[in-house]
Image: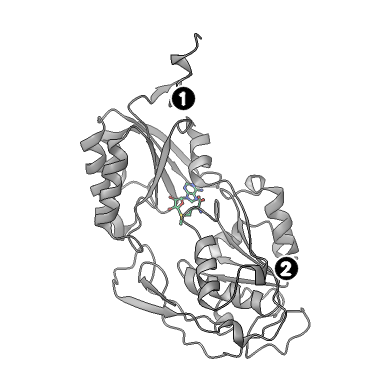
Amino acid sequence: MSTDTNADVDTESTSKCGASTSEASTDKSSSNCGASSNTDDSSGSKCGASSSSGSSTSNSCGASSTDDSSTEQEVGATVDDFDAEPGQLIAVGLGPGHPEGMTERAKAALLAADHIVGYTTYIELIPDEITEDADDIYDTPMCGEVSRTEESIDRALAGNDVAIVGSGDPNVYALAGLALEILESKGATASMVDFDVVPGVPAAQSCAARLGAPLVNDTVSISLSDHLVPMPEIESRLHSVANENFTITIYNPWSRKRRENFEKCCEILLTHRDPDTPIGVVHGAGRDDEQVLITELGELEELGESEIIDMTTTIVVGTEDTYVWDDRMVTPRGYETKYDY
Ligand SMILES: C[S@@+](CC[C@H](N)C(=O)[O-])C[C@H]1O[C@@H](n2cnc3c(N)ncnc32)[C@H](O)[C@@H]1O
């Protein structure tokens, strides 16, 4: 399988099991699942990948990148390159970002893992007592999700119990699906690595909780990130969803590269909903820099240039029934049609 990406996501390396660990491992134990460094037995880290070469290219992904060039990443080692009894691979959702927001099951899964793999920002969200307990932490900067996911799979195929982490839930615009796709492309199976998913609280729910009760009726999520879904398709989906009376949660709303997507999104929403439709904007729910704003749809586009809307913001667009009461967004579930209160 080859995985198409562009500069907005992941061009940092063709990371095989160990090929690029020197660039990113936080070196908690000097244990890397590296074909060239698997002589370090002290941590119990195993690497069975026969491939040790990996070319590092500069990481041109990211919100501020202006490079639109595409790269094609190919899966490196296949299941035949590993001799070891495979370890376990678990995709763990960390929830919104504070330790209290993590489930007990997520904490237990991370404590049980030999290796923890993830985007640096997410690794930093994990309590120290968990990361210090791991044999190895493999973290890479923004993007790199394909190489990072492949790295986690290779480490599991090499015999390590691996947790790959992400914010929120692994099934919401996250890596659970990619992990299964890459496993399949390597000729492995999910059962071989005892693949499991540990759910976490998704951003939509964390953000809704900060806003009141905007999501208690039918809700649809849309991501404005166009690195995997072309913008015309996103626009068409937005039209369909906004045309129905659903609450909409908007993920990945803004980056310098996506300014036009955000503006287009505001324009589409306003063709279907009144400018005074209540919206909630939540930046960094559960994190130190959390910001919460309830305002109206007509004000949304201007907010695109303000600090509250960026890559860690989720926007909740109310339905035609949503109202604001005492600084809380409320979307009626419909009880009032059947009951007197
Ligand atoms: C790649 S998606 C990952 C979603 C994640 N798997 C989840 O379940 O929430 C990243 C987007 O999630 C949203 N997001 C993640 N963490 C957030 C937070 N703490 N507060 C608000 N939005 C957040 C933002 O829209 C961000 O652009």
Residue under circle 1? 333
Q: Which amino acid type is shown beneath numbered disc 1?
A: Arg
Taking the view exactly as shown, the residue that stands out farthest to the top is 340
Q: Gap between marks 2 and 1, in whole Å?
A: 45 Å
Residue drawn at the location 29% of the way across and 75% of the way down: 69
Q: Residue 124 at what x, y percent from top left?
A: 60, 60
Q: Is residue 111 above or below residue 278?
A: below
Label disc, if present, on residue 134 of the rendered structure: 2
Any part of residue 17 in sight: no
The residue shown at (21%, 37%) is 271
Residue 244 seen: yes
13 or 131, nearer to the observer: 13
Identify the residue at horizontal 68%, vertical 66% (top origin).
194
Q: Is residue 140 left or right of residue 4?
A: right
Where residue 258 appears, x then y in whole percent? 30, 57
User: 166 above or below 250?
Assistant: below
Q: Position of residue 68 (x, y in %)?
A: 28, 71
